Amino acid sequence: MSEALEKVASVDRLSVFPLPLVLLPGEALPLHIFEPRYREMLVDVEAADRLFGISLFEPDAALTDRPEIGSVGCVAEVREVQAMGDGRSNILTFGVIRYRVVGFEEDERPYLVAKVEFFEDDPEPAGKLSEAADEIFGLFERVAKAAFDLSGNRGNCPNSKRPIRNGCRSWSRRRSILRIRPNTNCFR
């Protein structure tokens, strides 16, 4: 069991903060909490496990006042809280693990509480993914070289592979991202 799954092992319901943004596992997200219902949620979250959910929700495009059943969000762990004198707070959260909304609880709380199930990516066989990443990176190198040649040799991408990786900002990091296989079930 992963560290992220261990952190949420006893959680099956999650306070949900619907926002027009996406939090990813491993990502930091600062938030300013000012609405009374989310101030109350923060108090409840701090008293419990310091975890809540952030679900993508764009009210202008939605037919309801909440994320759809089956939608995907990310658990946010409250790492720091800076309380202000008027009840507002600045908080720093960190993405833990993705979840799927399977239902909502209807109770007296002014904020949403969802029944959730957590999921992680299935591991991909290393050889298959490595081959695809190498092929894509090779194609990128060809495009970078062609762009360099077409530009009259201006820029940071000379002919050699080593300068391309070092000269073009963080390509080795981008290459490692290609090695991540998304779970196609999360898009249903």
Image (tube, rainbow, N blue to C red):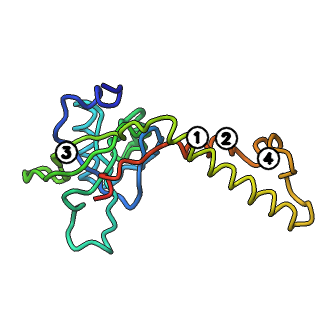
Observer-nearest residue: 47 or 117? 117
Observer-nearest residue: 19 or 40? 19
Which quarter of the rendered picture does the N terminus lie within?
A: top left
Give the residue drawn at x 69%, y 44%: 170
Residue 140 x, y percent position in the rendering = 69, 55
Of mark 4 and mark 3, the one earlier in the sequence is: 3
Q: Examine the rendered structure and indicate whether residue 121 appears above or below residue 149.
A: above
**Which residue is label 4 attached to?**
164
Q: Of the residues shown, which amino acid type is indicated by label 3?
A: Val
Q: Few, some or many C-alpha atoms within 10 Å of disc 1 (few <14, some 14-19, many ≥20)?
A: few
Q: Marks 4 and 2, Cα distance to the nearest angstrom?
A: 10 Å
Of mark 4 and mark 2, the one earlier in the sequence is: 4
Q: Which mark is residue 172?
A: 2
Do the residues bearing badges 4 and 2 touch, measured as CB atoms within 8 Å?
Answer: no
Give the residue drawn at x 42%, y 38%: 124
Q: Marks 4 and 1, Cα distance to the nearest angstrom?
A: 16 Å
Q: Nearer the viewer, mark 2 or mark 3?
A: 2
Do the residues bearing badges 4 and 1 touch, measured as CB atoms within 8 Å?
Answer: no
Observer-nearest residue: 132 or 27? 132
**Which residue is label 3 attached to?**
116
Of mark 3 and mark 1, the one earlier in the sequence is: 3
**Which residue is label 1 attached to?**
176
